[in-house]
Amino acid sequence: MKTYLFRTFYFLLCAFCFASLSFAQTDLENLVNTEKAFAKFTAEKGMKQGFLEYSADDGILLQPTATNAKEYWKAKDDSPALLVRNPTFADISSDGRLGYTTGDRELRAQGKSDKPTAFGQYATLWQKQINGKFKVILDIGISHNKSQPVETDRLSPKETSESKPPKFFEFLEQSRVFDRSNSATIYNKLYKNNLADNVRVLREGKLPIIGKKLADKELKNAAKELSLQPKFTFDIKNLAYTYGKYESDKEKGSFVEIWKYHNGKWQIVLDIYTK
């Protein structure tokens, strides 16, 4: 009898874990498909209508200062310009409610038939709405001087059974990562022990810096003085983000950091500054 109960319990546990992972995988595919649908809609209707259709009512654009996405695009004139986005990486929280896509982008000033005139990278945060559809809640991008096609690389969420992570905002408060100080201290406080192995670092004028080893090298050589001023922090399950202003001895602009709870700790998976 005990053996039967144990086998039954084990079977149900495996079924639950498999179902949880399947649901998460489905949510990830839905997110990527939404990104593709957004790109198709934009190509047919234009950038203005594309962002108006796919942005949440409270969605934010960093241009570089934070502004309501719908208000920004409503104020813009219609244009033939086409923004081509190619998602190269996507991930989603284990409950399927918050995700992000990132990849390369190019601008064709006169539409499909025109040659690209500007290149860059984008990062977009998506949140599932009450109706089950994903909408853009934050969009940011950087520019560089050439295209970099990359094979699509999607990461399925794997931490579906981890213990509940500590509150993200409290984690940031306790780690005091927003102190103003020299670059060595900023690196040690913010990046050294918090970078995910597959972290993506996006900076103006540079191609994507992917992976902890390359990110370490880039961030150690950052500005001598840096101040991060977070305006908004949000987390769902095991995915979180914060955005706001940054200021260094060289420049100022806006930043976004996306964090994921993995292996018992919050880790930075994407770090982007735009000016």
Image (cartoon, rainbow, N blue to C red):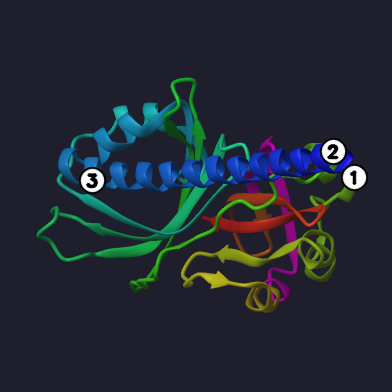
What residue sits right under mark 1 in the picture? 174
Per the rendering, the mark at residue 67 is: none
Q: Are marks 2 and 1 in contact (CB under 8 Å)?
A: yes
Q: Secondary structure at mark 2?
A: helix
User: Nearer the N terminus, badge 1 or badge 3?
Assistant: 3
Residue at x-position 14% and y-position 53%: 111
Q: Position of residue 40 (x, y in %)?
A: 23, 45
Main secondary-structure element of the magenta-colored stretch: strand
Residue at the image point whose x is 43% and y is 47% from the top: 29
C-alpha separation, residue under disc 2 versus residue under disc 1: 6 Å
Q: Which residue is mark 2?
A: 170
| Range of magenta residues | 219-245
Measuring from the top left, give residue 162's x and y in whole percent. Answer: 78, 46
Foreground of the two, 227 or 165:
165
Q: Is residue 175 above or below residue 70?
A: below
The verdict on residue 239 being magenta is yes
- Amino acid on which disc 2 is placed: Glu
Residue 257: percent from left, percent from top: 64, 51
The correct choice, above or below, for 192 with respect to 214 in the image is: above
Residue 181 vs residue 267: left or right?
right
Report the amino acid beneath label 3: Lys
